[in-house]
Image (cartoon, rainbow, N blue to C red):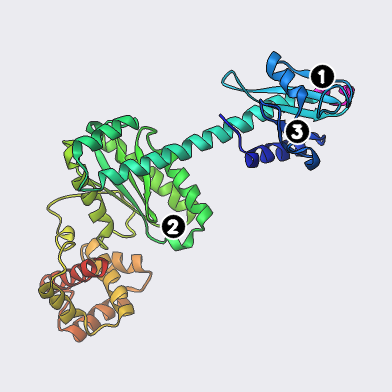
């Protein structure tokens, strides 16, 4: 493993804050690539070569003992039994010798941390590549499965597709978006395939017990909602019975997150093929668009959003005025007034089953061509 100059500088800076002595980061070929004394960067350090030969701590007693050296201690740094660097501390032996163990341990910890982060980033790039193959309908399925095995995944063992839709991502800084990914990644099965899709996250899991898996998703969902003050919709596909249907499973999980009925609900939702909320997502032709427009044309864009949310909440609570008003943080008299106002403006009464279905279909069609 090779340490970059930037990473070596970070290690030197961290160590300098702890021991307050001049420190050099030296490569196994004897070149100082980072130092608290910037004048020494790029110099050859013959003492480090002695450390590489013996793999032991090497003491230099005078500034002229070896080429490019100063009085001090030089310490071998290992990663998995391989010597990957030499750390030099400049100064009198009596003053700096007690730092050698600290420098060795801290250096190894910092290098391992860097190696771990580098490996994690590499794995994430591989996961992103594999997910792009899975979502590409033009890729040969057998070729995809072979590439997946090369990357450590057996597609025949994937059981469910999951989509995490972050509904108010604009509230989160770029830094916290990265932390959010880490939060999900740390709390799901380490064998699962997880990657980003725009501002959302998609996951393929090996988990076989759906009830246990769903409970874990709910726990993670509640944790990240509380930690980052966001709302998340989690859609889960039906069980994947054959890896040739993985893309269909993605469409199922995605359809849940596209259906505005499910936005802002606290539960994890699994796809049900007989649910009417998924019926209109692929429809955007002239006839259906005209149907939606003829009903919603009396409302401006802001009103459409407000009324849509109200109608979806009303449906979710099975027509309960009290429960719907509580969710919308309004008085139930206010809700009744607004429902009556919709009836007066459109001629369609949402308090009747026929009217509610008609409005629901109009909004679902509207959403399908807005998102298309």
**Comparing marks 2 and 1, which lies closer to the viewer?**
1
Residue tagged 2: 230
Quarter location, residue 101 = top right
Mark 2–mark 3 distance (CA, rounded to whole Å): 45 Å
Q: Mark 1 points at which residue?
A: 59
Q: Earlier in the sequence, mark 3 or mark 1?
A: 3
Numbered disc in front, either 2 or 3: 3
Q: Is residue 181 visible?
A: yes
Q: Quadrant of residue 358?
A: bottom left
Q: Is residue 97 within the magenta segment?
A: yes
Label 3 to label 1: alpha-carbon separation: 14 Å
For the residue pair 287 and 209, the one nearer the viewer reads as 287
Secondary structure of the residue carrying numbered label 1: strand
The magenta segment is 92-98
Q: Is the magenta stretch mostly helix, strand or loop?
A: helix
**Residue 43 figure quarter:** top right
């Amino acid at each position: 493993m090779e340490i970059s100059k930037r990473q070596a500088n970070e290690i030197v800076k961290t160590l300098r804050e702890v021991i307050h002595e001049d420190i050099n980061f030296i490569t196994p070929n004897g070149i100082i690539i980072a130092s608290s004394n910037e004048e020494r960067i790029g110099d050859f350090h013959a003492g480090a070569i002695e450390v590489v030969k013996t793999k032991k701590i090497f003491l230099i007693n005078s500034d002229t003992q070896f080429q490019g050296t100063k009085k001090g201690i030089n310490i071998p740094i290992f990663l998995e039994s391989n010597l990957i660097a030499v750390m030099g501390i400049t100064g009198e032996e009596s003053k700096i010798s007690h730092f050698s163990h600290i420098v060795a341990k801290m250096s190894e910890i910092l290098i391992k941390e860097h190696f771990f982060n580098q490996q994690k980033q590499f794995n994430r790039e591989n996961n992103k590549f594999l997910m792009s193959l899975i979502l590409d309908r033009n890729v040969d399925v057998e070729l995809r499965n072979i590439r997946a095995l090369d990357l450590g995944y057996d597609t025949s063992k994937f059981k469910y597709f999951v989509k995490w839709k972050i509904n108010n991502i604009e509230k989160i800084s770029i830094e916290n978006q990265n932390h959010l990914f880490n939060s999900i990644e740390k709390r799901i099965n380490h064998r699962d395939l997880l990657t980003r899709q725009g501002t959302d996250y998609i996951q393929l899991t090996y988990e076989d017990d759906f009830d246990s898996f769903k409970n874990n998703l709910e726990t993670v969902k509640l944790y990240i909602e509380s930690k980052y003050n966001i709302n998340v919709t989690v859609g889960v596909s039906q069980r994947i019975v054959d890896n040739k249907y993985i893309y269909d499973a993605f469409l199922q999980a995605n359809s849940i997150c596209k259906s505005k009925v499910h936005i802002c609900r606290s539960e994890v939702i699994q796809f049900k093929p007989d649910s009417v909320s998924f019926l209109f997502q692929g429809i955007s032709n002239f006839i259906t668009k005209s149907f939606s427009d003829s009903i919603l044309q009396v409302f401006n864009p802001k009103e459409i959003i407000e009324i849509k949310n109200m109608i979806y909440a009303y449906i979710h609570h099975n027509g309960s005025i009290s429960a719907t008003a509580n969710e919308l943080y309004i008085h139930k008299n206010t809700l009744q007034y607004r429902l009556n106002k919709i009836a007066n403006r459109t001629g369609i009464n949402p308090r009747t089953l026929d009217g509610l279905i008609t409005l629901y279909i109009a909004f679902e069609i509207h959403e399908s061509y807005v998102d298309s």
